[in-house]
Image: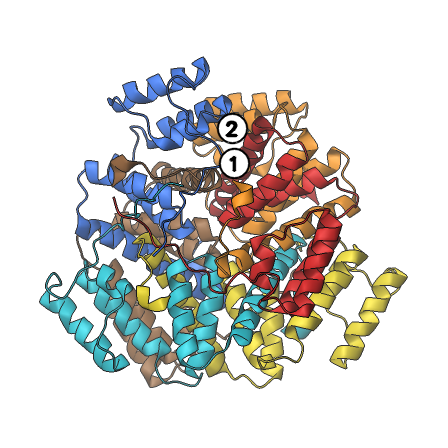
Chain colours: A cyan, B yellow, C orange, D red, E brown, F blue
Amino acid sequence: MRAKILPMPIFALLNDEQASPAARTVFDDIMRTRQTTSVNNFWRALANHPPTLRRIWENVKQVMGPSRLDALTKEMIYVAVSATNNCEYCLHSHIASARKLGVDDEQLAEVLAVAGLANETNRLANGYRVPVDEAFR
Amino acid sequence: MRAKILPMPIFALLNDEQASPAARTVFDDIMRTRQTTSVNNFWRALANHPPTLRRIWENVKQVMGPSRLDALTKEMIYVAVSATNNCEYCLHSHIASARKLGVDDEQLAEVLAVAGLANETNRLANGYRVPVDEAFR
Amino acid sequence: MRAKILPMPIFALLNDEQASPAARTVFDDIMRTRQTTSVNNFWRALANHPPTLRRIWENVKQVMGPSRLDALTKEMIYVAVSATNNCEYCLHSHIASARKLGVDDEQLAEVLAVAGLANETNRLANGYRVPVDEAFR
Amino acid sequence: MRAKILPMPIFALLNDEQASPAARTVFDDIMRTRQTTSVNNFWRALANHPPTLRRIWENVKQVMGPSRLDALTKEMIYVAVSATNNCEYCLHSHIASARKLGVDDEQLAEVLAVAGLANETNRLANGYRVPVDEAFR
Amino acid sequence: MRAKILPMPIFALLNDEQASPAARTVFDDIMRTRQTTSVNNFWRALANHPPTLRRIWENVKQVMGPSRLDALTKEMIYVAVSATNNCEYCLHSHIASARKLGVDDEQLAEVLAVAGLANETNRLANGYRVPVDEAFR
Amino acid sequence: MRAKILPMPIFALLNDEQASPAARTVFDDIMRTRQTTSVNNFWRALANHPPTLRRIWENVKQVMGPSRLDALTKEMIYVAVSATNNCEYCLHSHIASARKLGVDDEQLAEVLAVAGLANETNRLANGYRVPVDEAFR
């Protein structure tokens, strides 16, 4: 049994003192919008490049904010895509969000089941080169 | 302007006469379950290998059938994964299913927007190697 | 019904007159090695950049040539990966090679079934974040 | 040097006491079919959702069981797809299975070499948009 | 030889009359920023959902606009990622942009060669599970 | 807080004594070409299969060596593809190379921003099935 050296991220996670004023402005908006007093690692990593931090936060605010699709449906889609792409961070963060919105373990398992099956039939349809039905047009 | 030669699928699409009795039994179950009189190209392609046809149909019936998640949510997840994997056939077939279940163009555009953004932030979280927050555990 | 304009490849397919002497030398080696008188489109496209043409041909010759794994097994692996990545060209070319080596439709369907299922369980194992068993180490 | 906190899986690995009767029935079938007395983590994770546990096990039993392709070929295809999709768990579990079936390190390295090269030529064929040869149809 | 039915996009491409005022405002900004009188199909498709149209255009303007990396380098990175993901549309559009910025065929072939090789070594490093060197930290 | 067991790679990292003469010849060429006295883990893992070690090294030497594209541009493309495919090892090794060639944190963040955005628009273009503009042909 060997202790593992913690993998260093590409960029440091910036705390409030290390973050630039531009980054802290985004931190403040994140906390205000989400009504929380903490800022997740994702944003503290992006704070190394404030234009990306602000851009991605504006995107998330628009796409994941109130709209025609309810918030939980959007979190479940996010989980399914993150499982498809194998993003460990995104899986944990969006599962946490989905749970706050009320998803239970059985529903979560169903999200992963749909994602898993779609990954299989995607390859079968592509591998067999199935032509699109006229009826779908 | 040049006419395109239709890309030949790997396997022929089997009509009812060409399909084996084992495949036709699955076709019958598909039509009965979906209350329709037609069988899509995907199943007619898989009919070249009846064990796969039956296996995949049983999977789809279980995963996409009545359960804790509603049918439309599952179709939207399917669309998002299929866009991520670039499966043309699956996009068209599951968008057709979602539309039958009442999704409108605005909601569909939102599904693709969430899928698109997740694909971006998946790469940012992976590229920055962001460590998972303790709070998510 | 509308005629489709044939998608133009990024680079022209070079015929024997258009190919440089360096590219024709590779063409000759391809035909000699494969004991054929034709050169596939893939090589005629790569001929636009002779260093890539020669490099990729040398790689294919080494990896797909006589070795510990038999030629058909290697073609089947190639088909499975190409279905996973949705490479239409590679699917058709390696299925053609596998068929020349004796694979029949049932075996080919099994290759795609294994590839399909692997794509599903890959996402389930990644999505559930299943820790590797000690027994596998 | 910092000790790493073990990443928590999304779901707990269920031991025999925690698993539901439905899940234990699948565990029993796994042990009987594989003639072993242990159940791998993958199945203990899926046991959190018995319908998925049973469904995936039935799929694996059908696809990976006796058929036209020999068992080792199917394990090698599984390894190649798992390397393509970067599934750490699946790599370890299917390499373990392939080794039990007699694959040696040299053959295993060849499987990964074919998978690696296919991933390169898949992108070259897709990137150059190479049209499929008439000869492959 | 069979004529192909043109695959219908999921959404219609909106011309200037069909686009909403919100979408036309973005079209105008695209033409002004790029100093051109035409709007590409990508934007005409996104115009079906004006919030996505505006959001993606603002992203592209920020990321691909003047910054520390020169415009051609960014287009080449875009081409490499699009080849990796097999996005036909993005390959053509970003190769067109790179050519306007002066890239020649030899350089373009090199971009695809680097992308291809990276796709191979990515799978070898992941497949072999190579631990990160201390020297890289 | 639990100590983590270091994930065992598939193959051992071979030191100079364990490597075969064929592998050591490649190690020597790597150190001579790169004017260094150390050999990275990637090569020590591939040394388990000397034909792959030599083949991949020859590929890297050709593709990443002096050519029409400058070395830094090629490293940045490698980073973008590695982020897209989630290759932790390749991200760290090619970011290390890019930094040696002078890239700073702001430029590196821009590389990841372009890669991230490309991953989003790739899915939007594929998901909307946007037809390629005539103007790009």
Q: Chain of mark 1?
A: D
- Considering the image in quadrants, where does the C terminus of chain D appear? top right
Residue at 39% from the left image edge and 72% from the top image edge: A96
| Real-space CA distance between mark 2 and mark 1, rounded to the nearest whole angstrom | 8 Å
The reply to whether residue A51 is visible in this rendering is: yes
Give the residue number, with chain letter if any, for mark 1: D117
Give the farthest residue toward the front: D17
Mark 1 surroundings within 10 Å by alpha-carbon count, few (fewer than 14), some (14 through 19), many (20 or more): many
Res C59 label: 2
Q: Looking at the picture, which amino acid does disc 1 mark?
A: Leu
Viewed as shown, does residue E105 lie left or right of D19? left
Q: Nearer the viewer, residue C25 or B14?
A: B14
Residue at 43% from the left image edge and 43% from the top image edge: F7
Q: Quadrant of residue B117?
A: bottom left
- Count of marks, rendered view: 2
Residue at 25% from the left image edge and 68% from the top image edge: A55
- For the residue labelled by badge 1, is the local secondary structure a helix, a strand or a loop? helix
Res A130 label: none
Q: Residue A67 placed where, x, y %?
A: 39, 85
Give the farthest residue toward the top: F21
Q: Quadrant of residue F39?
A: top left
- Considering the image in quadrants, where does the N terminus of chain D appear? top left
Q: Residue B90 placed where, x, y %?
A: 60, 66
Q: Looking at the picture, which amino acid does disc 2 mark?
A: Asn
- For the residue labelled by badge 2, is the local secondary structure a helix, a strand or a loop? helix
Q: Residue B124 placed where, x, y %?
A: 32, 58
Mark 2 in CB contact with mark 1 (< 8 angstroms) = yes
